[in-house]
Amino acid sequence: MSPKIQWNEAGLAPAVVQDAVSGRVLMLAWMNEEALSRTIESGRVHFWSRSRRTLWKKGETSGNELHLRSLTADCDGDVLLVQADPTGPTCHTGRTSCFFEPVTEGGRAPEPAPAPELGPALSALTRIVRERAASRPEGSYTAALLNAGTPRIAQKVGEEAVEVSLAAVSGSAGEVVNETVDLVYHLLVLLEALGIDGRQVAAEITRRFPDQGS
């Protein structure tokens, strides 16, 4: 195991879990050397339960797994940051994140401004594109596009944009919706091919169109 990880006296290190798409902090748990190895080997996030003194995979009972995207340590090597794609609510309460209780002392604490997010539908589609990019399954159209390279994907974006325009001219609202979905999908594939996080697009939208009633 990497010597950079500074395990505590119990052989553990805290692991902060972050949604790989939205950037939201989902939970905090503990890992030991075995949990870290299982996480890396399986691509599913594992932890060590201090109360039950046993290894456990997130979602083994609820089905709400965490699919690993990246795993890094802080500068001191004693805290782990896990970026993952959740398959359902992370918290046992059914909430998306375990962090939802405001901390107050002598009054109400200000709530931090949320980071720009893609929205549930776009986030889900982004995760699908990322999964196909990581696994490149045989027969996957997304994988075939990514294997073909950026020029081909860019060409498809242009073709789909034309299809949206033609559908608009024809006056068919249903076709406009269908072609727009195709265009958005190909744009997400293009972003993935270029290594651009969709949150960068969300942040730019927020910068250009701040919520001021305009």
Image: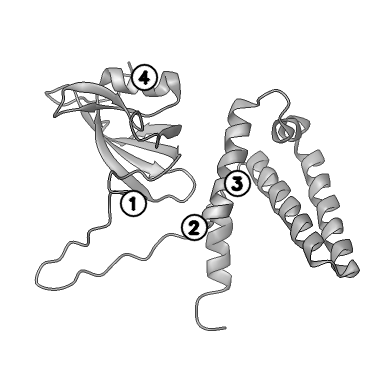
- Residue holding disc 1: 95
In the rendered image, the vertical position of residue 196 relative to residue 179, given as above or below: above
Q: Is residue 206 visible?
A: yes
Between marks 1 and 4, how big is the CA–CA gap?
26 Å
Secondary structure at numbered mark 1: loop
At label 4, the amino acid type is Arg
The quarter of the rendered structure image containing the N terminus is: top left
Foreground tag (1 vs 4): 1
Rendered image: mark on residue 38: 4
Q: Earlier in the sequence, mark 2 or mark 3?
A: 2
Q: Position of residue 23 (x, y in %)?
A: 43, 49
Say which residue label 2 marks: 117
Q: Secondary structure at mark 2?
A: loop
Residue ID for mark 3? 125
N-terminal of the two: label 1 or label 3? 1
Coordinates of residue 99 in the picture (x, y in percent): 27, 52
Secondary structure at numbered mark 3: helix
Q: CA distance from mark 1 to mark 2?
A: 17 Å
